[in-house]
């Protein structure tokens, strides 16, 4: 039998890891001390993205692409005829340290196919993190993909060495998961989410009483859902995300637009960029829930439960609720300012601070970074705003679209090659 060399393993397992999008900045606060390696105290893992969206700062690999499951949507499924490889614990540790010292990376994102069983796989992932922390004094960012079905004892140990843990829901609904991955269940995935949530809460409570309490997953937990492999509506996906934010204190929900890689009668055939556009809109909708005060039910209508692919969700909401506008930027509460298309959170804080000293107009908003090509139709100030007359125009949607240019130029992102 020919075993792959380390370079070949890296090519295989880095490529296989690119389908997992749930690696992101962390909020980790591990500080560098004399004689130790790495530092994530300033801003967690600092991502650097190329123009086409590739992440260039994490060593993002699978421990192995061997897997006992046969999920229809997964390139590593056991029935797929692909080249298989597996790292040893020592190999992953050595790669992480060597790449870090060469300034290639700032942290490690480690996932894995499930070999033998959940506990065996998770225990191997934890050994990597433990070895980096205890033997090499590595204080950089570590994100471990949790394995559904792993015991509480192993999950507890994982939280002591990883900055972030994530457990992928994979498919938004239990029925969709049963169709495409009948050996898995949402209950199996949700159980460790609840455990991690409770352990994080316990750590915070103990920290109030004791000075030196071991950190437990200081950057929290996240999850990922594949969008478009099954027939869930955007409204359903948004409400699933909202449920997990509220009940499991998730830091992030990631959305991965389904792109066909395997032939399977259970999978849809998609030959356009719609999944990527839909993924982008879901991220924007997610942002509205997390930072702009929108409820899940507001973002998409029940009668039309899919996001508008032509305009962003905030603008789509404004077009459906024109009676809420125009908004006076000099007097409106912050909550309403956040709902003006083209006005971001930072701009809202600038507006609230600046209007204490002077009456603001359109030129002031431009200097603050507001996207006035959208905002100008929805605001009013002391002088007459000629653009608000279009709010009642039958062709208002067409008028506003003519003044916009999509920033979504290249939806196809790739993981940076290490070679």
Image (cartoon, grey):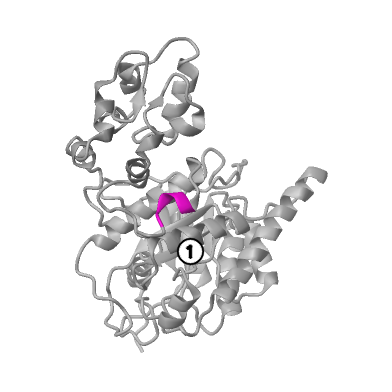
Instruction: Name the chief secondary structure element in magenta.
Output: helix
Farthest residue, direction bottom: 1
The answer to which quarter of the image holds residue 317 is top left
In percent of width and height, residue 158 lies at 62, 64
In percent of width and height, residue 115 lies at 50, 81
Q: Residue at x 57, y 41 (%)?
A: 41
User: Residue 222 versus residue 374: which sits nearer the camera?
Assistant: 374
Q: Which residue is mark 1?
A: 110
- Whether 284 is drawn above or below 182: the answer is above
User: Residue 364 versus residue 383: which sits nearer the camera?
Assistant: 383
Q: Quadrant of the C terminus?
A: bottom left
In percent of width and height, residue 204 lies at 72, 48
Secondary structure category for the residue under label 1: strand
Farthest residue, direction left: 402
Q: Quadrant of the N terminus?
A: bottom left
**In the shown orientation, is residue 23 left or right of residue 248?**
left
Q: Is residue 219 visible?
A: yes
Question: Which residues fall within the magenta stretch?
Answer: 297-301
**In the shown orientation, is residue 141 left or right of residue 299?**
right
Farthest residue, direction top: 357
Mark 1 closeness class: few <14, some 14–19, many ≥20 residues within 10 Å: many
**In the shown orientation, is residue 164 left or right of residue 48?**
right
Q: Residue at x 45, y 23 (%)?
A: 350
User: Residue 242 versus residue 109: which sits nearer the camera?
Assistant: 242
Q: Residue at x 35, y 36 (%)?
A: 341
User: Residue 403 versus residue 97: which sits nearer the camera?
Assistant: 403
Count every numbered label the image shows and give the total: 1
- Whether 280 is drawn above or below 167: the answer is above
The answer to which quarter of the image holds residue 363 is top left
- Whether 144 is drawn above or below 72: the answer is above
Q: Residue 149 lies in magenta, yes or no?
A: no
């Amino acid at each position: 039998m020919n075993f792959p060399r380390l370079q070949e393993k890296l090519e295989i397992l880095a490529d296989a890891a690119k389908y997992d999008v749930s690696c992101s900045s962390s909020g980790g606060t591990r500080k560098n001390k004399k004689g130790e390696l790495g530092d994530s105290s300033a801003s967690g893992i600092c991502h650097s993205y190329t123009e086409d969206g590739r992440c260039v700062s994490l060593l993002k690999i699978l421990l192995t692409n061997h897997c006992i499951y046969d999920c229809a949507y997964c390139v590593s499924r056991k029935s797929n005829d692909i080249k298989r490889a597996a790292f040893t614990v020592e190999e992953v540790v050595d790669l992480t340290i060597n790449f870090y010292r060469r300034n290639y990376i700032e942290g490690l994102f480690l996932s894995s196919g499930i070999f033998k069983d959940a506990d065996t796989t998770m225990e191997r992932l934890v050994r990597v993190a433990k070895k980096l922390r205890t033997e090499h004094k590595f204080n950089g960012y570590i994100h471990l993909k949790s394995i559904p079905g792993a015991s509480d004892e192993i999950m507890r140990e994982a939280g002591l060495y990883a900055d972030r843990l994530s457990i992928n829901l994979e498919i938004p609904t239990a029925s969709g998961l049963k169709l495409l991955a009948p050996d898995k269940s949402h209950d199996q995935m949700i159980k460790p989410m609840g455990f991690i949530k409770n352990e994080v809460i316990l750590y915070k409570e103990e920290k109030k009483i004791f000075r030196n309490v071991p950190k437990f997953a200081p950057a929290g937990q996240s999850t990922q859902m594949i969008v478009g492999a099954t027939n869930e509506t955007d409204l359903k996906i948004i409400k699933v995300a909202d449920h997990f934010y509220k009940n499991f204190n998730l830091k992030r929900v990631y959305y991965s637009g389904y792109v066909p890689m395997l032939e399977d009668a259970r999978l849809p055939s998609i030959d356009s960029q719609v999944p990527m556009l839909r993924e982008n809109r879901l991220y924007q909708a997610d942002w509205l829930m997390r930072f702009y005060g929108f409820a899940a039910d507001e973002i998409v209508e029940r009668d039309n439960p899919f996001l508008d692919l032509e305009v962003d969700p905030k603008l789509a909401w404004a077009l459906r609720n024109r009676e809420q506008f125009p908004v006076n930027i000099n007097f409106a509460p912050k909550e309403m300012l956040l709902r003006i298309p083209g006005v971001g959170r930072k701009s809202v804080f600038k507006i609230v601070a600046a209007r204490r000293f002077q009456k603001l107009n359109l030129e002031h908003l431009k200097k603050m970074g507001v996207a006035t090509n959208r905002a100008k139709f929805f605001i009013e100030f002391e002088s007459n705003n000629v653009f608000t007359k279009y709010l009642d125009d039958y062709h208002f949607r067409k008028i506003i679209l003519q003044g916009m240019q999509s920033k979504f130029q290249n939806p196809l992102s790739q993981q940076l090659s290490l070679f």
